């Protein structure tokens, strides 16, 4: 399976081309910074280089509490190749996770492997390849669902611990919006199992007590991460929730349904998609889509209909304001106000369609179902071929740019699938026929990955070339100067190594007003929302006093500023870093009170004469939370190892 993904994603798997957008502007610079901190034996609790500093430990997208990031950064050097590898690792996790889920749902092992690959090459995965946290979520969600369903059936401790581990991995490394939706999906699965299994009261009590244990273990394992999130929420602008319009923003628009036919349609400048390019793709392959739809029509069993209805609800929610579903969720379901990007709901539609497609593929073993598929394949081939001929004739405008090039692969694939199931059985054994169909489907998905590779995955710039530019920047944590803090033009600055054009302060080791992260610190927003912000602060120094004084920055690391001050009067020494609980100060090694200035900076009072001033960002609870998380993960993995032999 992994080899197939290496071929499909070779530009990323072989670390040849750099990723783009958020994958490098955020994930790369953050994890590179973490690696530098770990190499210096520091825990990266504070990030001083963007937006005048913010608490990285409290940012849910930073990955500080995510074990995979530990493995990639503890070595001391995180490069653009590491960034490519991180994405590819989670694509592989997605493939094996879907295989695991499908086998739990009684899909044949070979079919599960094929459709695990289909999921890993599907439209949502390729579309969000630049949003690493979303790909992380898509990697772990099938594992969570599979382990949870397995535990519901067996009630064994091993399955419970495995489900807790998978939930933690998804929460710690993934996107909060996916986590919230996943909670409701798991609740729906529980209700479905309760209704379909007709549990007795004794069984129901066992399940309730089991879920209490599940919740307690999940909270216990996630306590360090939860502390960080709770600590940060009151200081984030999003903590009160988004507006209704904000929650419905960036939808999967109705016209984006065309991506179900072929992903080459996405992002075309001649089509008004009315959404972000990353939210347009839902392709899972033409043949799997047909098989899934046929399964619902020909074999409308209870489980099949449950998955289909859930998938339809999710796609309607993904359309944002184009349907009322996302608004209903916003109004009536807790936590649904906390995330934007309505289009992410389609991730669960993708999972549902892949499951249905896999079950439909297994159903081809039945002669009646196979006969219906032949008829549908023939009809599809004729219909699509007709559309293609009309397009290339130029006599009728379809309103689609490059329609012949887009539809030709669909024609070839539908015809090939038809031929495979039309040739006499004397010519092809059933097993060979099924393998040919699987090969056709995988080639289709592999081509679809390459079709969008330089649109939503890779930047087209070679890793070694960009890394060479990045390597010219300072390493470690050089002592910053006390010159006025200047802003750089993050969009067009030629000295920033492309495609890294945001958060360049992390690379240049430059403390800056600018940068980008999803933490959205309230203090920072209050500061930059001033109409004359740049005029007021264009001469702001990292360290300043109200009256002239001699100031020298003597030592520095991301959580510590050492300052020598010579002043003739009692002064307030101000450090131009955003105030957040955890800042401490010492004057001549004696602790003093830290105050928040009217500009939301950090400050303390210093007497006359020469003094040594130290500002520390040292929230011991956050440090303890990080160490606790490492310890509890080791214990959890050990417990899983202990219970697994007992299960066998």
Image (spheres, rainbow, N blue to C red):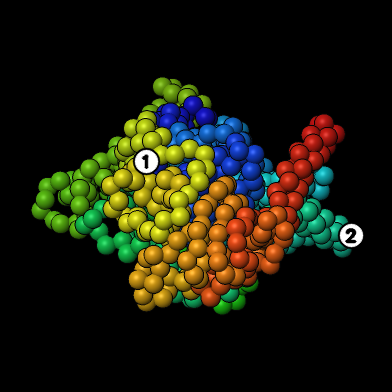
User: Which of 584/51 is in front?
Assistant: 584
Q: What SS does tag 1 mark?
A: strand
Spot the residue most to the right. 202
* Looking at the image, residue 325 lies above or below residue 155: below
Q: At 15% from the left edge and 46% from the top edge, which residue is drawn?
A: 392
Does 239 appear above or below 39?
below
Residue 648 place in picture, x, y as percent:
81, 31
Task: Name the foreground residue: 548 vs 572.
Answer: 548
Q: Secondary structure at mark 2?
A: helix
Q: Which residue is mark 2?
A: 202
- In the current view of this chain or complex, which residue is farthest to the left? 395
Looking at the image, residue 391 lies above or below residue 643: below
- Left or right of 485 in this view: 589: right
Q: Nearer the viewer, mark 2 or mark 1?
A: 1
Q: Is residue 569 visible?
A: yes
- Residue drawn at (33%, 32%), measured in percent from left and top? 465
Residue 294 appears left or right of 268: right
Which residue is tagged 1?
458
Horizontal and vertical percent position of residue 298? 51, 51
Specify the label residue 152 is tagged with.
Answer: none
Q: Residue at x 28, y 47 (%)?
A: 494
For residue 114, say whether it is visible. Answer: no
- Would you say 581 lies left or right of 316 here? right
Question: Between disc 2 and disc 1, whose residue precedes?
Answer: 2
**Vertical placement of residue 385 versus 249, above or below:** above
Residue at 42% from the left image edge and 31% from the top image edge: 15
Residue 229 place in picture, x, y as percent: 65, 61
Residue 424, image x, y percentages: 40, 27
Crowd band around label 2 with a 10 angstrom C-alpha radius: few (<14), some (14–19), many (20+): few
Give residue 181's quadrant in the image.
Answer: bottom right
Q: Residue 358 vs residue 386: left or right?
A: right
């Amino acid at each position: 399976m992994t080899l197939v993904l290496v071929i499909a994603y070779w530009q990323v798997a072989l670390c040849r081309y750099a990723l783009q957008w958020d994958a490098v502007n955020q994930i790369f610079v953050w994890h590179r910074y973490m690696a530098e901190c770990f190499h210096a034996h520091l825990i990266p609790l504070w990030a001083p280089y963007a937006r005048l500093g913010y608490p990285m430990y409290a940012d849910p997208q930073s990955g500080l509490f995510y074990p995979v990031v530990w493995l990639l950064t503890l070595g001391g050097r995180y490069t653009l190749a590491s960034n490519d590898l991180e994405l590819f690792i989670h694509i592989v996790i997605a493939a094996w996770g879907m295989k695991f889920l499908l086998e739990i749902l009684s899909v044949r092992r070979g079919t599960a492997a094929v459709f695990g690959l289909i999921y890993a090459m599907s439209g949502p995965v390729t579309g969000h390849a630049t949003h690493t946290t979303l790909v992380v979520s898509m990697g772990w969600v099938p594992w969570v669902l599979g382990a949870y369903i397995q535990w519901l059936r067996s009630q064994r401790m091993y399955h419970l611990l495995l489900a807790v581990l998978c939930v933690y991995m998804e929460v710690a490394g993934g996107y909060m919006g996916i986590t919230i939706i996943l909670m409701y999906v798991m609740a729906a699965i529980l209700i479905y199992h309760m209704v379909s299994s007709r549990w007795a009261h004794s069984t129901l009590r066992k399940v309730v007590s089991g879920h209490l244990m599940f919740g307690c273990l999940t909270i216990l394992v996630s306590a360090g991460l939860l502390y960080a999130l709770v600590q940060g929420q009151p200081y984030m602008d999003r903590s009160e929730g988004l507006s209704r319009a904000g929650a419905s923003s960036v939808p999967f628009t109705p016209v984006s349904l065309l991506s179900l036919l072929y992903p080459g349609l996405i992002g075309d400048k001649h089509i008004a998609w009315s959404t972000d390019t990353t939210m347009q793709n839902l392709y899972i392959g033409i043949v799997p889509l047909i098989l899934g739809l046929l399964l619902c029509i020909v074999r409308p069993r209870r489980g099949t209909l449950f998955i289909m209805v859930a998938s339809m609800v999710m796609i309607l929610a993904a359309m944002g304001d184009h349907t009322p579903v996302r608004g209903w969720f916003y109004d009536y379901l807790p936590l649904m106000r906390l995330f934007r990007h309505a289009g992410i709901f389609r991730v669960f539609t993708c999972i549902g369609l892949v499951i249905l497609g896999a079950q439909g593929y297994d159903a081809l073993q039945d002669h009646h179902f196979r006969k219906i598929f032949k008829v549908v394949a023939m009809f599809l081939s004729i219909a699509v071929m007709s559309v293609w001929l009309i397009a290339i004739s130029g006599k009728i405008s379809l309103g689609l740019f490059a329609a012949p090039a887009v539809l030709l692969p669909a024609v070839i694939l539908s015809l090939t699938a038809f031929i495979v199931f039309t040739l006499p059985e004397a010519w092809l054994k059933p097993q060979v026929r099924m393998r040919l169909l699987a090969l056709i489907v995988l080639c289709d998905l592999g081509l679809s990955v390459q079709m969008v590779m330089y649109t939503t995955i890779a930047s087209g710039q070679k890793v070694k070339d960009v890394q060479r530019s990045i390597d010219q920047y300072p390493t470690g944590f050089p002592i910053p100067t006390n010159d006025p803090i200047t802003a750089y033009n993050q969009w067009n600055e030629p000295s920033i190594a492309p495609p890294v054009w945001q958060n360049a302060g992390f690379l240049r080791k430059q403390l800056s007003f600018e940068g980008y992260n999803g933490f959205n610190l309230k203090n920072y927003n209050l500061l930059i929302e001033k109409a004359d912000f740049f005029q007021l602060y264009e001469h702001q120094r990292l360290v300043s006093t109200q009256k002239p004084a001699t100031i020298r920055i003597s030592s520095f690391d991301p959580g510590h500023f050492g300052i020598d001050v010579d002043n003739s009067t009692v002064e307030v020494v101000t450090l131009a870093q955003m105030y957040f609980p955890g800042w401490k100060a010492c004057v001549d090694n004696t602790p003093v009170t830290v105050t928040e200035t009217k500009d939301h900076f950090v400050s303390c009072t210093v007497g006359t004469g020469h003094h040594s001033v130290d500002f520390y960002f040292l929230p011991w609870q956050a440090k303890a939370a990080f160490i606790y998380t490492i310890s509890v993960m080791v214990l959890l993995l050990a417990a899983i190892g202990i219970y697994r032999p007992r299960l066998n």
